[in-house]
Amino acid sequence: MQRVQPQDFERVLSSMCTKPHPAARDAAERFLATNPGDPGTYETIAELERKAVEMLGTITGLPSAEGYVTSGGTEANIQAVRIARNRAATDQPNVVAPESAHFSFNKAADLLNVELRTAPTDADHRADMAAVKELVDDDTVAVVGVAGSTEYGRVDPIPAMADLAADHDAICHVDAAWGGFVLPFTDHRWHFGHADVDTLTIDPHKMGQAAVPAGGLVTHSTELLDELAVDTPYLESKSQATLTGTRSGAGVASAVAAMEELWPVGYREQYHESMENAEWLAEELAARGHDVVAPDLPIVAADMTSPVTEDLRQRGWRISKTGAGEMRIVCMPHVTKSMLRSFVADLDWY
């Protein structure tokens, strides 16, 4: 069989995943065949998962964290909604989220038979709190805030959303799948140390530079995690709170290795480099007459016609669009200033 090589990252500007750190790559290869879904048998990887959760707790302002390493943000968000539904005393559960919430919440609503109510965002693409309040009622089981939205990198008013959730005995879930590894170096209030947050999604395989798959679900409470538990009579461990059963230890080991190498100094340096790149690109696009959504985190959105976007794709650039049709570029760790200069040079052909 011909040896097929993976696509390189040389012109990838739309992905929220990146090249894994060398230490993360090495750890993933060493732990490929282990199964953290059976912690009684695979004790080493189980201990590494506990360490991963502890480190994610440190990053998200939670000294005694519970949770596990998921396949990604989608699984973590589904599990957060499942926790909210299972703990509630209503037969008509609903979840309230901004329209900027990731499409994984649509999957969660469909799978779990939960109504998803979406509130509009304001002029700066953040959750409109007045609209969120209008949607919350006695059957609301969770209020979702986004900390680093997929399209614009915006952060919702998490403390206000947490207070609203608490007033209705609902959980507050924060989706920081992408933003969680850049937000610690900003002034945003977004995590357990800033507000009465109950569950949080944060993905090491995004800005954390772990190998795919390595997501994360973190909570402050064993009782909340127990809402997910099912009996596992034929395993050495007697219960399991994860959505998937068998899981590769590669993601767990990779996440620990990346965080050990990069937290906090390496991540801080990467945040500043990524923000500098995003701000440079935004200025270059604005200078060429494009309307640009100014980056708050390292994501740039700008108006761009479909023919131009398609031609850039034909030149090999991997770019995507927001729901409103703007071109969207994510300044991940693999995105260098040199890459962006080449991109702008190709754009100048038009």
Image: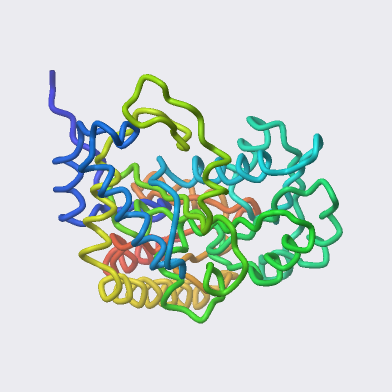
Q: Quadrant of residue 150?
A: bottom right
* Residue 225 visible in rendering: yes
201 w.r.t. 243: above or below: below
**In the depicted structure, whether residue 235 falls above or below residue 191:** above
Residue 312 visible in the displayed image:
no
For image coordinates 44% across by 68% down, the residue present is: 298
Residue 87: x and y in percent read 67, 43
Q: Picture coordinates of residue 269 (x, y %)? A: 29, 76
The residue drawn where x is 55% and y is 46% is 77
The residue lying furthest to the bottom in this view is: 187
In the picture, the quarter occupied by the N terminus is top left
Query: Residue at position x 36%, y 71% from top?
Result: 274
Q: Is residue 86 left or right of residue 245?
A: right
Residue at 65%, 58% (x, y): give it. Answer: 172
158 sits left or right of 240 in the view = right
272, 25: nearer the viewer:
25
Residue 343 is left or right of residue 73, and the answer is left
The image quarter containing residue 281 is bottom left
The picture places residue 340, in percent across and down from the top left corner, at: 34, 66
Q: Quadrant of residue 64?
A: bottom left
The correct choice, above or below, for 335 with respect to 159 in the image is: above
**Colour scheme of the picture:** rainbow
Q: How many marks?
A: 0
